[in-house]
Each structure stands twice: as C-alpha cells, then as structure tokens.
Image (cartoon, rainbow, N blue to C red):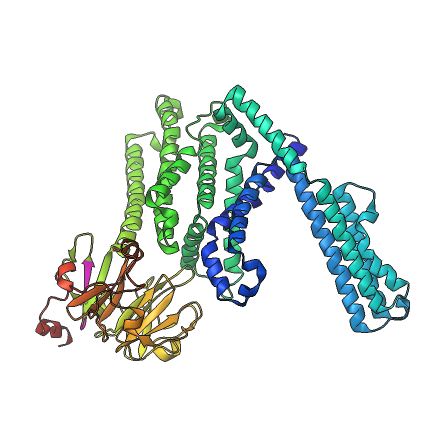
C-alpha cells in the first residue's frame, strides 16, 4: 500500500472518531436532570435555557449530526474539517486583534509606535500572528486571495497610521463584522450542499439496494467505514483520556495494587455505554488476533500466513465478551461492580484465547510426534519424557490454582460476611447459608493488631481511587493492611495509627455506635445515639447540614417501625446488594432502587419492615456470654 493510500486510510478512521465520541457523550447526558439543575441555578433566567423543548430537540439534532459525520464520504469529511479549521483560525485572529486593542487602550500611548519599545513589541507580535493566520487560512482554503482573511489587520494598519485609540476600537469592531459577513456569505452560498449530498447518497443507496440488496449495502458500509478499527481507536482514545485524567490529578506515586485496581476500574469506566462497550469488544478482538498471529508465526513461521484459518482471527473472543456483557447487564452496574464482573469476563476471554492457541498447536504437535527426527533432546528418553509430563502437570496445577484462587477469592469477598461480638468473630458463608465450620475465633487472630474486643465499627472505603479498611473503637481508629494481614503503623500516605477519629474524620462524632460506607454517594455515615453524620471521602470533610436525625435520613416505610437510635451495626451486603441496620435481635433493610421501582411510594433510603436476625442469618453470635468471656481469662 502506497503512503498516500495509508494516509487516506488513517484519515478515514481518525476523522470519524469525534462523531463516535459525540454519540457517547450524548448517551451519557441526562437532559431532564440537566434542566433540573439549571432551574436551581442563576442560568434559569437565561432565555436560552427557558425553552426546554427546543434544547431537547437540539439533543436529538446532535444525534443526527453525529450520524451524518459518521457516514459522510471521506473527501467531504476532510473538506468539512478544513472549513472548521479555517473558522478556528479566524477566531484566533479575532482574539489576537482584540487583545492587541485592549493592551493599547491600557497603555494609553497613542504616539508613533517606533518611539515606544513595548508598543513596538506588541505591534510586531500581533502583526506576525495575523500574518500567520492569514497565510494558514489561505493554504487551508486553497486560494491566493489572502485579502479575504486579512480583515483583522485593519486595527494594526490604523495604529500604524496614528489613528486615535478610541477610533481603533470601532475599526476592530468593523473588522469583526466584516469577517462575520464573509462567513455568513460562505454559508449561504453553500446552503444547498448538504441537500445535494443527501440527494446523491439516497440515489446511490437506492441503486445498490435494488441491484445487490440490503445485505450487500451493509457490508459495503462496514468496509468503507472500517467499523472494527474505528471503534477500537475510539475506545483506545477514551481509555487514554481516562488514564491521563487520573495521573494528572495525582501528586503521590501509586502502589502496584492500586494501579491494578485503577486499571480495572478505568476499563469499567470505558464500557458504560453501548458505543464504548462495542469499542472494548473490537479492541479485545484485535488483541486476541495479535496474540494468535504471534502464536502461529512462532509455530509455523511465514507458512502460517499462507493457509490462514478464518476461525482464529479473534472474532470468537470479541463475541464472547459481548454476549457475556449483555447477559449480565454490564453497562447498567455501578463502576466497582462492573470492574469486578469485567475482570471475570476478561478471564473467560483469556481462556478462550488459550483454547484457540491449543487448536493451532494441536495439529503441529501431532505432526512432530509422527517424525522421530523432530523430537527434542530433552524428551529423547522415557525418563526425560516423564519429567516433562510431571513438569507440565505441575505448571497446569499452578495455573488452575491461581484461577481458582482468583475466582474463589472474589466470590468469598463478595459473598461472606464477618460478624463479631465481644472478643470473638464469626464468618458467615452466604453461599452455604451458615457460619463457617469451627467459628467463632478470637478477633485478634483473624486481624492482627486491632483491639482484642468490643470493636465499634468496621468500614471498607472502596472507590476507583481509594481502597482502605478501617476499624473503630472508642475515640480511635486503625487502618488495616490486607497485603501483610496486620494493622498499619504507618500507611503509604505517611499517616500513623492509631489515630483520633476527630483528626482523621473532622466533624464526625466520637465515640460512635457504628458506621458504614455508602458506595452510591461515596459518603461514610457515622451513627451515634439518634443522630447520623455523613462524611465525604472525596472532599475529606463533613457533608453540609449534618448531623441529622437517623429517622430523617433513613425514614421508616411503616409508621412506628424504626430503630430510632443506638444502632448496633450497619453493613452493605454484596450478596443482596442491600444495606442492613441491626439492633438487638432485629434488622431493617434499606430500600433499594429495585424496591422503589416495584413500589414508587417508598422514600429514598427508607427502612423496610423489621425482621428477626435469626430468620435470615443462622447461628450468628448464638453463644452464651460465659463462653465469650473465656477468651479474656
């Protein structure tokens, strides 16, 4: 392929990426909530925002514009971008002229420019800038009539002719109006171009459909738009922007564990819409194609490309990802849940790639087995062959063990809950609906370094950039180090523990009854008596308006059925995706989004009707007090 053809192929993809990004932004944009925010802001008095239906129609116009840009022929698309570039250059010329006039007015010097060095420097800089703008506009529009773009030179000419500064302001306005009229004339002269393009496109499409059918038309558009490469480039740009936005706001280096967590959450952020999900599907397909191509090249050399198998081109892996994402409702989940579900889906995709590699290698291995000359020296005796067999077995065992650890560890974290009482704790296995065999165990055995009894609360702050576990007792709190399975004496940020609650969470009560982290609003809720205080982990400060009464923040759905205060425990269950309030032998479930869909009368964060703990969690803390005291003797 010639360099010119390669450049055309790159332009064909690169110039269409913004249209996909615009579709993605429009999909994310909630117009109704946007106008609700506008109504609460000073912009509500702006006439532009008083016509809601007009803006709604503009939202759909944005979709139409994106589709037009996506399907526009390459030549017209390049021409459109050149027009946009010219408009931006003219705007830059206007900015240069405006800044020059403003600086001249501030200097209040209206004498000859060559007598004042600063005035001469400003004039020279503005003149060079305007000449560059005029030259670039002339080159982009492919015309020798450079005077068409030189209206913004008029203020400079007027200043050179010692025109009064007040008059230069009017000259600058005239230059701006003249340039605007030129733009309007150009738009009016090309007003029928979109109609003619649409008419020509319709005629060509009708001919193709009549002769070859809709399927051929679809395949033609697929090939001309290079849809797989287009969506892959779009997703890579989206992912790169996500990475850049993260590191541009970080002042401290990030640990490897956080980098891995951030990598997963970034991928999850980049598949929250159908367009970005398709981009991820095509990206995975191309990655799989690259791996399989390297595998074939390693095994067969250049002969692999002579007899290519259409089944080993990465399509299977991409389709697998798409089917699993649709079946599990991936894009509808929260970012944290999406990240972990996506990690399992990607694990399955990797397994599919390995299966494809096995299909490639299997006939080659059989062919080698039929030839004694190709047997490696390390397998030339029965003993060395047995050694290789056992080595491969142990490697496979290691890989499968890692696989089970990864999946089981994730399931255990998501499904098992820890309950504690006095100096003991129970691990509740939700998948078996019972406590773990052998429980309870002393608290200080399960978590090294924390106080040995009477823990007030445990919270796990888990966001895309924070992963911290805290234990609270009295007026102090500790941060836990899960990597070393012990309490931090000093965390990676340099904070030493134990630490006063009032220092780490200013505005929070101390001591507390219990606390929990709400992933929905990224707040920690501290409970004490009949009040609750919300603390923002992003702003690192108490939420305005708190503390409030618990019954106001978490109202009862049934009048009179509320714990009121002195809550024993509040925790989030990954098994049911619900929040539970526990007091004495009773618990209250917090209303979820699904509950509110089924019953819209439920208030936000409402508490459902009480139930007994023993009806949902069996054998929890079902031990006599005398047995619990044995651990302290």
Q: Is residue 541 above or below residue 287?
A: below
Residue 478, located in which quarter of the rendered image? bottom left
Q: How many marks?
A: 0
Q: Nearer the viewer, residue 11 or 51?
A: 51
Residue 491: x, y in percent? 39, 69
Specify the quadrant that holds the N terminus: top right
* The residue positioned farthest toward the top in the image shown: 211
Residue 295: x, y in percent? 44, 33
Residue 604, located in which quarter of the rendered image? bottom left
Residue 449 seen from this side: no
Left or right? Give the position of 495 relative to 164. Answer: left
Residue 349: x, y in percent? 37, 40
Residue 454, located in which quarter of the rendered image? bottom left
Left or right? Give the position of 485 relative to 495. Answer: left
Q: Nearer the viewer, residue 59 or 615?
A: 59
Highlighted range, magenta: 422-428
């Amino acid at each position: 392929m010639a360099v010119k053809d390669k450049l055309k192929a790159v332009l064909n993809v690169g110039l269409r990426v913004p249209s996909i990004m615009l579709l993605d932004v429009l999909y994310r944009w909630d117009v109704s909530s946007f106008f609700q925010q506008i109504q609460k802001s000073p912009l509500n008095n702006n006439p532009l925002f008083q016509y809601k239906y007009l803006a709604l129609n503009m939202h759909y116009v944005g979709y139409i514009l994106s589709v037009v840009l996506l399907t526009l022929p390459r030549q017209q698309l390049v021409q459109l971008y050149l027009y946009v570039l010219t408009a931006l250059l003219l705007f830059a010329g206007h900015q240069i002229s405006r800044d020059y006039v403003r600086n001249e007015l501030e200097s209040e010097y209206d004498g000859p420019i060559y007598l004042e060095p600063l005035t001469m420097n400003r004039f020279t800089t503005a003149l060079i800038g305007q000449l560059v703008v005029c030259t670039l506009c002339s080159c982009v529009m492919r015309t020798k009539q450079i005077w068409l773009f030189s209206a913004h030179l008029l203020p400079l000419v007027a200043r050179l002719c010692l025109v009064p500064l007040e008059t230069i302001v009017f000259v600058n306005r005239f230059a701006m109006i003249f340039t605007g009229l030129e733009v309007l004339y150009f738009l009016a002269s090309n007003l029928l171009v979109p109609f003619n393009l649409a008419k020509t496109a319709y005629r060509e499409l009708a001919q193709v459909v009549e002769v070859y059918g809709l399927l051929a038309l679809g395949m033609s558009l697929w090939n001309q738009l290079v849809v797989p490469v287009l969506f892959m480039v779009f997703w890579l740009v989206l992912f790169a922007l996500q990475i850049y936005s993260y590191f541009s706001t970080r002042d401290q280096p990030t640990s490897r564990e956080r980098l891995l967590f951030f990598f997963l959450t970034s991928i999850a952020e980049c598949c929250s819409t159908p367009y970005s999900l398709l981009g991820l599907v095509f990206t995975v397909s191309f990655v799989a194609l690259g791996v399989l191509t390297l595998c074939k090249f390693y095994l067969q050399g250049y002969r692999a490309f002579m007899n290519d198998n259409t089944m080993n081109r990465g399509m299977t892996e991409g389709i697998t990802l798409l089917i699993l994402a649709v079946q599990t409702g991936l894009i509808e989940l929260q970012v944290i849940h999406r990240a972990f579900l996506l990690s399992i889906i990607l694990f399955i995709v990797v397994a599919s790639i390995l299966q494809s590699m096995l299909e490639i290698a299997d006939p080659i291995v059989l062919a080698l087995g039929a030839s004694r000359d190709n047997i490696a020296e390390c397998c030339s005796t029965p003993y060395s062959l047995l050694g290789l067999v056992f080595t491969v077995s142990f490697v496979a065992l290691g890989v499968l063990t890692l696989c089970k650890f990864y999946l089981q560890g994730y399931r255990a974290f998501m499904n098992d809950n820890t309950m504690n009482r006095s100096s003991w704790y129970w691990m509740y296995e939700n998948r078996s609906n019972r406590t773990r065999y052998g429980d309870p165990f002393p608290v200080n055995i399960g978590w090294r370094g924390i106080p040995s009894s009477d823990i007030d609360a445990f919270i796990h702050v888990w966001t895309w950039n924070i992963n911290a576990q805290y234990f609270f007792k009295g007026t102090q709190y500790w941060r836990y180090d899960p990597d070393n399975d012990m309490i931090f004496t000093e965390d990676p940020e340099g904070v030493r523990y134990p630490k006063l609650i009032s220092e780490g969470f200013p505005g929070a009560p101390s001591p507390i009854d219990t606390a929990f982290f709400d992933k929905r609003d990224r707040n920690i809720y501290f409970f004490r008596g009949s009040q609750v205080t919300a603390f923002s982990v992003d702003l690192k400060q108490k939420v305005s308006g708190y503390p409030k009464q618990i019954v106001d923040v978490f109202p009862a759905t049934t009048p009179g059925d509320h714990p009121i205060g002195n809550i024993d425990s509040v925790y989030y269950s990954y098994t049911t995706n619900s929040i539970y309030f526990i007091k004495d032998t009773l618990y209250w479930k917090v209303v979820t989004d699904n509950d509110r869909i089924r019953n819209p009368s439920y208030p936000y964060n409402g508490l459902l009707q009480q139930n007994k703990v023993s009806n949902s969690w069996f054998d929890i803390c079902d031990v006599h007090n005398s047995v619990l005291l044995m651990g302290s003797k």
